[in-house]
Amino acid sequence: MRMRVMAAVALVAGLALGVSCSRTEKPAQKQDELTPLNAAEKYGGVMGGALRRAKEMDLIMPIQHSIRSFRSTEGRNPSSLQELEDSGYELPKPPEGKKFVYDAQSGTVRLE
């Protein structure tokens, strides 16, 4: 009988200890927080975005150079990219599904 009482006490104590330990909760992790478990994924995303922007700049920089050259000879920005091409400047083709957007006021180009 004494053994059963001791076993029951040990069981209750073990359950109580287990329940109290399981109640500790980890603080909620933020979505954009860097952890050892998501570091490789985050690094890949950052590097992929940097590569995409670098490729876009490879296309935009020659156009910007042509706009500056046009401005230095004509004294104004071209009214459109078509005017730039008609003046003899060779422009790269945008990637599939994208287009160059030109702002004649500021003389800037972006890829959309």
Image (cartoon, rainbow, N blue to C red):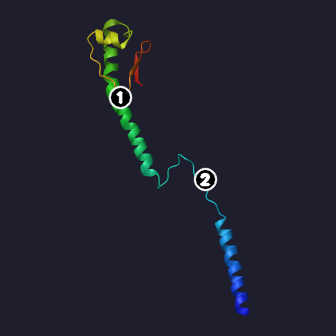
Secondary structure of the residue carrying tag 2 is loop
Quadrant of res 2 = bottom right
* Residue sitting nearer the eye, 97 or 70: 97
Quadrant housing the N terminus: bottom right
First in sequence: mark 1 vs mark 2: 2
User: What's under tag 2, amino acid-wise?
Assistant: Ala
Task: Give the quadrant of residue 46.
Answer: top left
Considering every residue shown, the one lying at the far bottom of the view is 1
Residue positioned 65% across, 72% down in the render: 18
The answer to whether the residue labelled 1 contacts the one labelled 2, judged by CB atoms less than 8 Å apart, is no
Q: Nearer the viewer, residue 100 or 34?
A: 100
Quick check: 17 above or below 92? below
Q: Which mark is residue 74?
A: none
Q: Residues within 10 Å of mark 1 (few under 14, many from 20)?
A: some
x, y (%) of residue 72?
32, 10
Q: Which mark is residue 28?
A: 2
Q: Quadrant of residue 74?
A: top left
Secondary structure, mark 1, is helix
Q: Residue at x 44, y 12 (%)?
A: 105
Q: Nearer the viewer, residue 78 or 23?
A: 23
Between the C-alphas of marks 1 and 2, the distance is 39 Å
Q: Tag on residue 57?
A: 1
Q: The residue under label 1 is which amino acid type?
A: Met
In the image, is residue 32 above or below residue 84?
below
**Nearest the eye: 70 or 39:** 39
Where 60 sits versus 11, above or below?
Answer: above
